[in-house]
Amino acid sequence: MIKLNNSPDLNNISSLEDTVLPKNTLKSEVKYPFPLYVFSKYIQETLLELQDVFSFEKPYTAMTTLVVLSVIIGGKMRVIVKNGWTTIPSIYTAIIGNSSIGKSPAIKIILKVLTSINEKEIERYEAKKAEWEAAIAGMNETEKREFILENKEPTRKRLITSDATQESLCHLLAKDSLVLFKDELIGWLKSMNQYRQGADIEFFLSVFNGLVGEVDRVGKNLYVKDPFLSIIGGIQPSILPQLTKNGNGDNGFLYRILFVMPESESVNYLSEKELSSNRLDTFYKKMEGLYDALQDEEMRYIPLSQEARTYFISSFNHYLKVASETKDDAIISAYKKVGDYMPRFALLLEVLHQLFDDKLGVHVESISLASMEKAKLLCDYFIGTANVVLEQTHGKSTLQGNHQSFLDLIPENTLVTTSELHKIAEQVGIKTSNVKNRVLPKLLEKGMLKKTDKRGEYIKNVS
């Protein structure tokens, strides 16, 4: 067994001092509690207000915020995880929820940042194109050729698309970072590899890591260096079992996708409340301002602080240890790939904090321990949702978050006492009081743990 000594205690993490939520509410009783408290104070307040006014699920708007920020940063910042290992902050995410829950409206109100930037890019393009055309007017052919060699024709940048074809994506990625937004992602997933077996998945896996994006079709060869693509869209819960079709579950592609679950399954009623006059406008303006500020910058490599690096390695190894003890390739792959997101989240959270809560503005020199701790809490959430999806797609008897870790650490074919279970609970961050009241009843109900004839003694069911 392994004990993660630096596993965060929500009541002791200094980086959570600015949380808008009372600390005694951080461990929520909702089914899939999203750790909103890892975000900057201004973002927390904004997303809580959106929930209060429009009944938008906090996990939906929070994840879209990270996606939007990832596209704004694009290829301008790259995290140095270790020597020889760098990563970009791109995100592939699926928003899970029934059609009546309002997935798309929650996504679109945050994506408005990028639609506004798109409108400004059209204006810039038209102005530059008019200048370019005026400059070549009246030139002879020789003069035009010489002018065009030195002054390329202006192109229009576009940060949002719904066209998932490789040709279209390569064309757009050659100009700027991009988000692929689909109201329903299942159509995109089903269309994978319709031209050539493995080609689409290979393309999206490559672009996910910022590697060369290349399309080889009959009569066409498109190539994009340093592409940046994030993906977001909805999926209905009943569709989850279909996600492993086309080999998506065997090649690791499915586990690149982060699954966001609603915190509530109740009807979202209309509210009499209205948004504060300036809150959302300030959110839009700050995000757009960051985009403008980054346009003339070259790519920067952002290192982890020594404390953040040590914490990341320990946390990542803990995920691998817990997953490997299941001896299940799907679980190991899912846990590892969620862990890969930790440095990406840390960069995004670092930038969010500086953009909205730091009077000095955005000045990222390195990734702090506080941002990495918060990133780990996000990854813990996505470990939990990955378990839910694994259960749907592979029939795994998985549990949420640290409950699954708790079960994984119980030795097989060995009698364990209540006292021993308490020790295991401490290793994965479960309070001993919750073992009796919440964890054990759930494991017993699911048949994952069995009582013996002796009081306070249990055995793991491995059938």
Image (cartoon, rainbow, N blue to C red):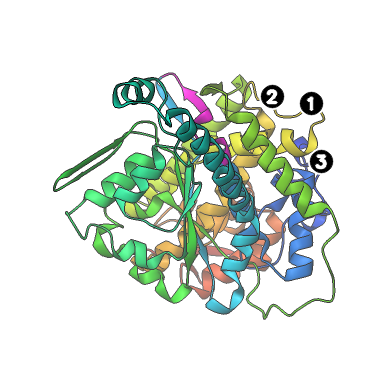
Report which residue position mark 1 lands on.
360
For the residue labelled by badge 2, is the local secondary structure a helix, a strand or a loop?
A: loop
Q: Is residue 86 left or right of residue 246?
A: right
- For image coordinates 52% across by 27% down, the residue present is 79
Q: Along the polypeptide, which appears first: circle 1 or circle 3?
A: 3
Q: Quadrant of residue 46?
A: bottom right
- For image coordinates 17% across by 54% down, the residue present is 197
For the residue labelled by badge 3, is the local secondary structure a helix, a strand or a loop?
A: loop
Report which residue position mark 3 lands on.
17
Most foreground residue, 383 or 66: 66
Say whether residue 77 is magenta. yes
**Dot 1 and dot 2 residues touching (CB under 8 Å):** yes
Residue 235 percent across, percent down from the top left: 46, 68
Label 3 Cα crowd, 10 Å radius (few <14 / some 14-19 / many 20+): few
- Measure how far apart labels 1 and 2 are at the Cα level: 7 Å
Q: Does residue 328 appear in this view?
A: no
Type of the residue with mark 1: Leu
Q: Quadrant of residue 185?
A: bottom left
For the magenta stretch, what is the residue range?
A: 72-83
Label 1 Cα crowd, 10 Å radius (few <14 / some 14-19 / many 20+): few
Type of the residue with mark 2: His
Most foreground residue, 111 or 446: 111
Q: Quadrant of the C terminus?
A: bottom left
Compared with 33, 227 (above or below) is above
Report which residue position mark 2 lands on.
363
Say whether residue 428 is magenta. no
Type of the residue with mark 3: Glu
- For image coordinates 60% across by 27% down, the residue present is 308
Compared with 180, 90 (above or below) is above
Foreground label between 1 and 3: 1
Residue 122 percent across, percent down from the top left: 55, 46
**Dot 3 and dot 2 residues touching (CB under 8 Å):** no
